[in-house]
Image (cartoon, rainbow, N blue to C red):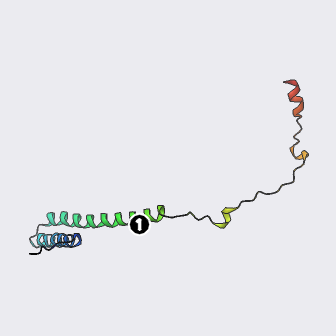
Amino acid sequence: MSEVEVSPNTQDAQSARKEIEDFLQQINTDNFAKAERSFKDMVGGRLGDMLDQQKAKIAGQMFNTAEVEIPDEQEEIEPEEVDLTPEDFDDGEDFEDDEETA
């Protein structure tokens, strides 16, 4: 006596088939209000599942990277060399005089 195990995928397929059969039966009996709810439930469930799969895929791509690559342009930034002379800083004020009066 062996028992037949039903895998989760088989159960999902059977459940989906039952939903579709109920939906079609509702349409055949002109029960459009109930058919509309059934249709929304079926589509909403599948859409939600697909969105969850895509979210997981994107999260995996974002957070499962071993190393963040930095473009070559941003790796080394060298400062510009500017030749400044004391005259470049002379604005006409003498700071030594300010210190003496304070």
How many labels, in total?
1
Depth check, front residue: 20 or 74: 74
Give coordinates of residue 79: x percent, y percent. 76, 57
Tell me the residue that label 1 is attached to.
57
Left or right, 1 with reference to 53: left
Give the residue furthest to the top.
102
Report the quarter where the C terminus lies: top right
Give coordinates of residue 76: x percent, y percent. 70, 61
Give coordinates of residue 58: x percent, y percent. 43, 65
Q: Quadrant of residue 99?
A: top right
Depth check, front residue: 62 or 21: 62
Depth check, front residue: 2 or 10: 2
Give coordinates of residue 12: x percent, y percent. 21, 70
Q: Quadrant of residue 11?
A: bottom left
Q: Residue at x 16, y 67 (%)?
A: 35
Report the quarter where the N terminus lies: bottom left
Left or right, 101 with reference to 76: right
Secondary structure category for the residue under label 1: helix
Q: Residue at x 11, y 75 (%)?
A: 2
Q: Residue at x 86, y 29 (%)?
A: 98
Q: Quadrant of residue 91?
A: top right
Mark 1, Cα crowd under 10 Å, few <14 / some 14-19 / many 20+, is: few
Q: Residue at x 11, y 72 (%)?
A: 25
Left or right, 41 with reference to 4: right
Give the residue furthest to the front.
1
| Vertical position of residue 19 compared to residue 83: above or below | below
Left or right, 81 with reference to 11: right
Q: Amino acid at mark 1?
A: Lys
